[in-house]
Image (cartoon, helix red, strand yellow):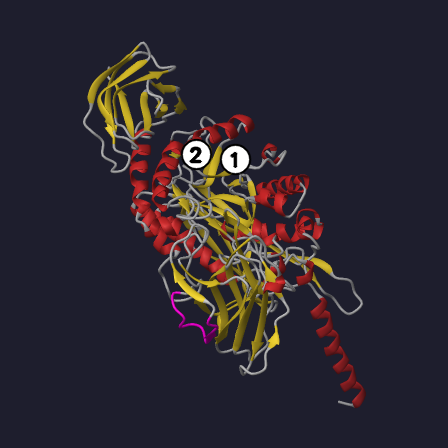
Amino acid sequence: MNRHKIVSVFFLIVSVVLLYSSCHILPSSIKVTSSSDTIEKYGLLTIYIDLKSTFTNPYDPEGIRVDAVITAPDSSMLILPCFYKSGESDQSNWEARYTPMQTGKHTWYIQVIFRSTGQEGVEDHTDTLVSKQFEVNVTESDNDGFLRLNPGSNYTLLFDSGKPFRGLGLNICWEFEPKWGDEKIYTYDVFLDTLAKYKGNFYRVWMCPWNLPLEWTKVISYTKLTDEYRNWDSTYFHSDGLTLVSEKTEYTEDDLERIIIPSNSNESIIYNLKNIKNFKLKLFYKNSISVDDFTFLYSSDNKTYKPIDKVEFSQTWNTYKDWHRIFIASLGELPEGTHYLKIEFHWKQAEPAHLAGIVIGYDEPASVLDAPGLGKYYQKTADRLDEILDLGKEKGMYMMLAHDYHGIFKPKLDRWGSNDEWRRNPYNAENGGPCETPTDFFTNPEAKRYYKNRLRYMVARWGYSTNLAVWEFWNEVDNVMDWQEVPAEAIVNWHREMAGYLKQLDPYGHLVSTSVVRRKVPGLWDIKSLDFTQHHNYGPTNDMHESILEYTGKFNKPDVVGEFSLGWKGPGKDYPVELYEGEFHRGMWRGLFSPTPIVPLSWWWEWHYEQGHYFHFEPLADFISLMDSSNDSVIRNISVTSNSTKIETLALQANNQLFFWLFNDDKLGRKNLILSIGGIEDGRYLIKKFDTWKGELSKGIETEIVNSQLLLEGIDIAGGTDIALYLQPIE
């Protein structure tokens, strides 16, 4: 072969290669398999997709969109988003999770729409890749399906099967152990196992920077020294003027051990640790405070000290009379090789200050949240949420998943000494995001596009689950309006757009809501795509029933109390610790007798677990089962009053059965009470007393309602206690 022929062949080969590289991806570039060709109704069909295609970010559907196109036996068609699992453009793995809601033959195929890059100088274009068609046969099953609103009652939800459901449980918003470590003390595994033991069936979970962060920036947590001043052992040096004390005072709440910094003095403390990275101290003071009251210094050798200029003062917390609590923390990391931290107090005030504790991060990273940032999702979170939903299914539990909480917009430390998450928020422009301010998150088109992409991923990965009961957009979104000055109109318009998009996107029609404390966000609950209202109720629960009636009456949709407790500061901090269990108990019983499909969900889940309070769920569950004992029972409120002003009374009717709850808000016992009942015909009943703490149901006693009055003869209610009553008509 001569030289000219060799050159011609060479250019022919190059041309073929270039032509091949610019052509559309061939059908052989997609391989699809499934977990089965026969499954039960409401069972799970998993579709595995091996793909060769062009993409930059597999989580961006504008670059690559993978869907399962499914035709049901009734000829209806649904588009099910698929989600990325692993790999690169040359070989990536995707998955679809399909829960069929009809029996019969379902046909499906996978469709890939992606942006293809041609030769240099040629504009990108869109290609479509379609798999062959597959079939799956769906048989009948005993599965109840997804949870829906009950059009006939606000007291229950309904499964697709028609079976009623009353949610009973509490918030388990985060795990307390290192998320990916080996310790398993306060994890979902432990909490859900205990809740199931006592017949709970519902729990609420947060997605936030420290629990299930799906879309966040990288965060490094270091080994921590926590010095609560039980002794001087943690300090390297302290001046003689500092006094270590251990006694309870009202202004330090539960901080018993602390250091007193005397008035009109200059004192100091030095800590010696390997490679100190950051610190945060907690201080109680009176009257006022300024940056001139402190100097923070660092050193590598305890000889030459340099000032730490970047420190932050948190919001203050007014604790008792003129006493205040504040946190003071370093901003950013201290220089590498910092082994000494010196804190100088220049306290010129008439009143002493109380240093209640310090936390110092040091040494090598103890954990790394290696989240990839905006528009890319943290796979460890996704895997853990898979595990939690599987665990919930195993235990017969249903989850309300809150996607975000208000603290992700806070620019500085709050009165808890935390929640300064805006500086790490991937939507923040300082982190490369599209938002200069928190308001931009709700109004900026690019920010909304990113959020919709996240919703698409969540529906693709977890929408299949019948144990995922509710998508909840925000925890206490009214705090964003109040604290970050985000206009209510922006919040309402965002919810209208996102709820509508989620309803359109989710082929299974999960319930959708959001939550507020109790502030008014005009127009929020008028959004039809928000299925129920949700508010939080902190303080004594004697208004629990009325608050639920207020929401249901005003907005004509069910209401859920997503959080409640006697105090929002914590047991023993705003109310005596011994009062918390009683309100935990009564708040749920008041909720059970209110028109809400989810019995109010308590906060402080780890504290109630430690105190052994989860047993309270079992009597509630048993009493709920009495209301469901007859098929198609319809629950309605009935009016009831007592002849004693100290007796709180609530009542329900389920078909022809009557249920009462009575609380004696007095030190003295009561007996032979008379109840006046509205809307019930006179008649003979078998009455049974139910012990709301032990769950014991007494033997029946015949009684009679005469002239709408019921004499509770022989039924005593001790002071400060509650009972429930169950009445069955005698034919």
Numbered tag placed on residue 597 in the rendering: 2
Whole-angstrom CA distance, mark 2 to mark 1, is 10 Å
Quarter occupied by the N terminus: bottom right
Examine the image and state in which quarter residue 485 appears.
Answer: top right
| 548 and 345: which is toward the camera | 345
Write the start and end of the magenta stretch as one range: 230-240
Q: Residue furthest top?
A: 707
Q: In the image, residue 454 lies at what x, y percent?
A: 59, 53
* Amino acid found under the numbered disc labelled 1: Phe
Look at the numbered disc 1 and give the secondary structure of its residue.
loop
Which residue is depicted at the point 41% across and 71% down?
Answer: 232
Which residue is depicted at the point 57% across and 37% down?
Answer: 519
* Amino acid found under the numbered disc labelled 2: Pro
| 566 and 499: which is toward the camera | 566
Q: How many marks?
A: 2
| Label 2 environment density (alpha carbons within 10 Å; few <14, some 14–19, many ≥20) | many
Identify the residue under disc 1.
532
**Does residue 719 appear in the picture of this structure?**
yes
| 388 and 62: which is toward the camera | 388
**Does residue 68 appear in the picture of this structure?**
no
| Label 1 environment density (alpha carbons within 10 Å; few <14, some 14–19, many ≥20) | many
Look at the numbered disc 2 and give the secondary structure of its residue.
loop
Residue 629 horizontal side relative to residue 528, left or right:
left
Q: Does the stretch in magenta take in 535? A: no
Examine the image and state in which quarter residue 87 appears.
Answer: bottom right
